[in-house]
Amino acid sequence: MNLPPLVQTFVLHFGEMGSRWGINRTVGQIYALLYLSKEPLNAEDIVERLGVSRSNVSMGLKELQAWNLVRLQHRPGDRRDYFATPDDIWQIVRTLVEERKKREIDPTMTLLREVLMQEPASAEERHAQERMREMHDLFELLTGWYADVQRLDTERLVQLLTLGSKVQKILEMKDRLFVVPGSKKSRRDDAKDK
Amino acid sequence: MNLPPLVQTFVLHFGEMGSRWGINRTVGQIYALLYLSKEPLNAEDIVERLGVSRSNVSMGLKELQAWNLVRLQHRPGDRRDYFATPDDIWQIVRTLVEERKKREIDPTMTLLREVLMQEPASAEERHAQERMREMHDLFELLTGWYADVQRLDTERLVQLLTLGSKVQKILEMKDRLFVVPGSKKSRRDDAKDK
DNA sequence: CCGAAATTTCAGAATTTACTGAAATGTCGG
DNA sequence: CCGACATTTCAGTAAATTCTGAAATTTCGG
């Protein structure tokens, strides 16, 4: 591995972290390298810097492309493919969340919906279905929230995150300002303990 | 594997999903099984239902305990250990997030802080450091937000999530109500482009 | 279309991770 | 402190994943 020490530290760390995420070490390293690089890199650059085989890099880049995590570029008068990460780190986060949702949450939701349609054949299955419904509803709430904030532009998103739970204070204020006399506890809570 | 079909579908799915999360198949299956089970199960129960070896179950349970994902219980007049997941699914989510933060985010932040202290020895390293600072700041924002909402009780958390970005509307309203005349930054849209 | 350059594919080797059975250790009632 | 039951450890094996080099394919200028 042929890298400035500072870069190498980061690249090695991300290789290890990759493993914990079901992403293999080389893929993690390639991504870390591209993330830190000012200029886009071609496959041969990556081979030299990481000291892995050309074919390994090819497969790693293919995987990163499948995840939409790298952009492919070309230089005039150069046939080779150059790769880079988005300059905007928030764009990276958005892609990461989007892709993980697609690969992990969506298939799970499909399965949950299917299983919840079936008729339970025993008390045990009835209880299991109840648990699955809890999970289904949880995921629905979370993905709904995600779909919503995902549409915000970055600045507003940052604003929201910076506020954190202080939003709560504002909500309370709102409640005090606009009490709807007829409703005791807000609609949400009714369904809660069904 | 000896399970009601409905339960088996779910257990197999979570085994597979586990792989994508750096958790091994058996551990995923054990957890899924416990999650669906009305009663706590002992190791032998799990062996019978999943059809894996006793020692494998022992290791899987140990791992789940290290993640704080299962509670250990005892029955009167029975020396065996019984395991269960929390009844409250929100508690499960909180634990999961907490543990992943501890294992993934915290060590990464430590490394980023260390590397950011060092003196860059070249333009390349300077740029790399800049990128790392972006990541550091991003993580700081996200963990700050998390630390904040994590303290909310579940009901308020659900309320917040249900609102999603509609909170934005309320923020705008707040801004209109309480403009601080002297502050230049008070209008969000200034900084927007750059 | 030819040939050089670039990339991809893929079978096998290397490495890592998961799993098992057997043995060791721990725990508790009597 | 014994003995039955329960759990853990661990070395060896099985299985899965990652990685490589060689060959195949694609791309493109001339």
Image (cartoon, coloured by chain):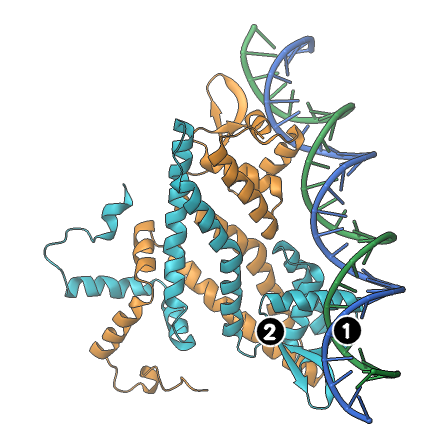
Chain colours: A cyan, B orange, C green, D blue
For disc 1, the marked residue is A49
Q: Is residue A96 visible?
A: yes
The residue under the point 49% across, 59% down is: A101
Mark 2–mark 1 Cα distance, whole angstroms, equals: 19 Å
Q: Amino acid at mark 2?
A: Met
- Which element is circle 1 on? helix
Q: B146 and A184: which one is in front?
A: A184
State left or right for residue A189 relative to residue B95. Answer: left
State left or right for residue A176 relative to residue B80. Answer: left
Assess disc 1: are there few (<14), some (14-19) or many (≥20) residues with their C-alpha within 10 Å of its C-alpha: some
Callout 2: residue from which chain?
Answer: B
Q: C13 and D26: which one is in front?
A: D26
Which label was assigned to residue A178? Answer: none
Name which quarter of the figure residue A167 lies in. Answer: bottom left
Q: A193 and B94: which one is in front?
A: A193
Q: Position of residue A22 (x, y in %)?
A: 62, 55
Above or below: residue D3 compared with residue A142: above
- Quarter of the rendering occupied by the N terminus of chain A: bottom right
Which label was assigned to residue B132? Answer: 2
Name which quarter of the figure residue A112 lies in. Answer: top left
Tell me the mark number nearer the camera, choosing from 2 and 1: 1
Q: Position of residue A178 (x, y in %)?
A: 15, 64
The residue under the point 24% across, 74% down is: B174
Q: Amino acid at mark 1?
A: Arg
Assess disc 2: are there few (<14), some (14-19) or many (≥20) residues with their C-alpha within 10 Å of its C-alpha: many
Q: Is residue B70 visible?
A: no
- Which element is circle 2 on? helix
Above or below: residue B147 compared with residue C27: below
